[in-house]
Image (cartoon, rainbow, N blue to C red):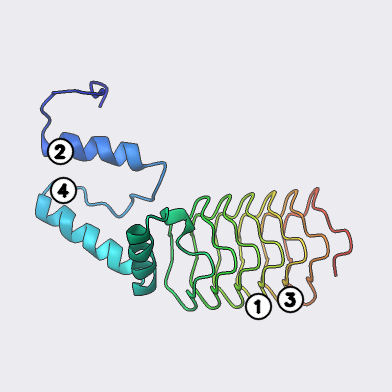
């Protein structure tokens, strides 16, 4: 990898290519499921298995439609219906999911930092362990959502509906919760230091 440069003509083995790409992609996705073997067939099968596990048919369809329309993948889910979708561990870093229906969706361990979820419906969604740092969730519906251990530091949850949500062990440091409804929510062991709780129920 230290020899790789633009226009390089260096011939590398498959094992060396695998090492390079795994290191390159490490900051974008969780590669813990990648096989240690460098067999082309085994790697192909692992990739297909991973795709089937985390990409629902709805997600694939929306991404394909966006591609054909020349729309960036990060904008493919605006107002989309992804209710009940299996999206565990998905990388939605900086994506626009505003107005999307994600009710009862499984987004546990997903990467949603900087994501735009304004007005999104996340009612009863599974978001445990999700990275939502600095995300926009204005007026989002998070009622009865599982937000156990979620990182919402510096996120904007103004006017959000968090009624009966489970926010135990959640990181809400410097989070904007102004005008949010937290009635009935579980905030045991949550970190609310420097959070804006003005006009919050």
Residue 61 x, y percent position in the rendering: 34, 70
Dot 2 crowding, Cα within 10 Å, few <14, some 14–19, many 20+ = few
Up the image or down, 88 lies above or below 114; here it is below
* Mark sitting earlier along the chain (3/4): 4
- Give the SS element for disc 3: loop
> In the drawing, what numbered circle is on residue 54?
none
Rendered residue at 79%/66% (across/down): 180
* Mark sitting earlier along the chain (2/1): 2
* Mark sitting earlier along the chain (2/3): 2
Contact (Cβ within 8 Å) of mark 2 with mark 3: no
- Kindly identify which residue carries mark 2: 15
Dot 4 crowding, Cα within 10 Å, few <14, some 14–19, many 20+ = few
- Kindly identify which residue carries mark 3: 163
Instruction: Find residue 54 and report its image quarter.
Output: bottom left
Left or right: residue 183 compared with residue 104: right
The number of callouts visible is 4
Q: Can I make out residue 91 in this image?
A: no
Residue 18 x, y percent position in the rendering: 20, 40
Q: What's the distance in space between the residues labelled 1 and 4, CA to CA? A: 42 Å
């Amino acid at each position: 990898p230290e020899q790789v440069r633009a226009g390089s003509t260096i011939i590398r083995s498959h094992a060396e290519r695998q090492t390079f790409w795994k290191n390159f992609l490490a900051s974008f996705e969780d590669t813990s499921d990648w096989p240690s073997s460098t067999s082309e067939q085994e790697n192909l099968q692992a990739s297909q298995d991973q795709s089937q596990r985390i990409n629902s048919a709805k997600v694939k369809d929306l991404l394909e439609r966006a591609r054909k329309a020349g729309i960036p993948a990060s904008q493919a889910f605006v107002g989309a219906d992804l209710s009940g979708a299996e999206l565990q561990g998905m990388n939605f870093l900086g994506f626009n999911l505003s107005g999307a229906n994600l009710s009862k969706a499984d987004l546990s361990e997903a990467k949603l930092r900087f994501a735009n979820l304004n007005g999104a419906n996340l009612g009863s969604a599974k978001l445990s362990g999700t990275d939502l740092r600095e995300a926009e969730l204005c007026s989002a519906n998070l009622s009865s959502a599982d937000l156990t251990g979620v990182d919402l530091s510096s996120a904007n949850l103004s006017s959000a509906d968090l009624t009966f949500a489970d926010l135990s062990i959640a990181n809400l440091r410097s989070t904007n919760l102004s005008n949010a409804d937290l009635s009935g929510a579980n905030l045991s062991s949550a970190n609310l230091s420097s959070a804006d709780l003005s006009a919050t129920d």
